């Protein structure tokens, strides 16, 4: 360790620990916030994907049972959701649940 390095280390002693650590803390906090944001986005996308799967399954059931095409099945779900003041996913789950109950012999 040469004299210039000692001088640099000695010159750091005049700074507070906060001054020395502030940039690192700032970067760490920004990365933490970005990670939280990405985790929230992942959760949102997973929820949307699950909703899409439910909707597609319900549309398939409606197409099969009612002999309609996909746009008509979508409109059926949409209209019933509006009429019942429910979300489309809830109506789709009810369609699927009704079919599952029917398969089990339940009412």
Image: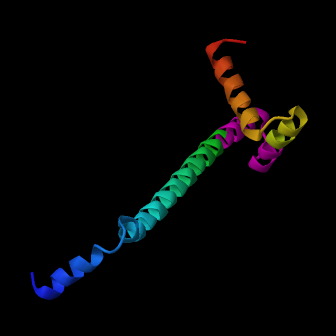
User: Residues in magenta?
Assistant: 55-75
**Residue lying farthest right?**
83
Q: Which of 104 and 50 lies nearest the eye of the viewer?
A: 50
Q: What residue is rendered at 22% in x and 77% in y? A: 9
In magenta segment, residue 61 = yes
Q: What residue is rendered at 10% in x and 85% in y? A: 2
Relative side of 103 to 31, left or right: right
Residue 92 at what x, y percent from top left?
A: 72, 35
User: In the image, is residue 81 above or below residue 5?
Assistant: above
Residue 106 at what x, y percent from top left?
A: 68, 12
Q: What residue is rendered at 74% in x and 47% in y? A: 70
**Residue 89, image quadrant:** top right
**Residue 14, image quadrant:** bottom left
User: In the image, is residue 70 above or below residue 30?
Assistant: above
Q: What residue is rendered at 86% in x and 35% in y? A: 85
**Residue lying farthest top?**
106
Residue 100 at what x, y percent from top left?
A: 64, 22
Q: Which of 92 and 13 lies nearest the eye of the viewer?
A: 13
Residue 42 at what x, y percent from top left?
A: 53, 52
Most prominent secondary structure in the magenta stretch?
Answer: helix
């Amino acid at each position: 360790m040469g004299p210039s390095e000692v001088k640099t280390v000695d010159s750091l002693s005049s700074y507070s620990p906060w001054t020395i650590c502030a940039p690192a803390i700032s970067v760490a906090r920004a990365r933490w916030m970005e990670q939280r944001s990405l985790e929230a986005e992942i959760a949102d996308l997973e929820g949307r994907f699950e909703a899409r799967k439910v909707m597609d399954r319900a549309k398939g059931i409606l197409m099969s049972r009612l002999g309609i095409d996909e746009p008509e099945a979508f409109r059926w779900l949409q209209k019933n959701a509006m009429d019942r003041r429910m979300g489309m996913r809830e109506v789709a789950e009810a369609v699927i649940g009704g079919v599952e109950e029917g398969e089990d012999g339940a009412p």
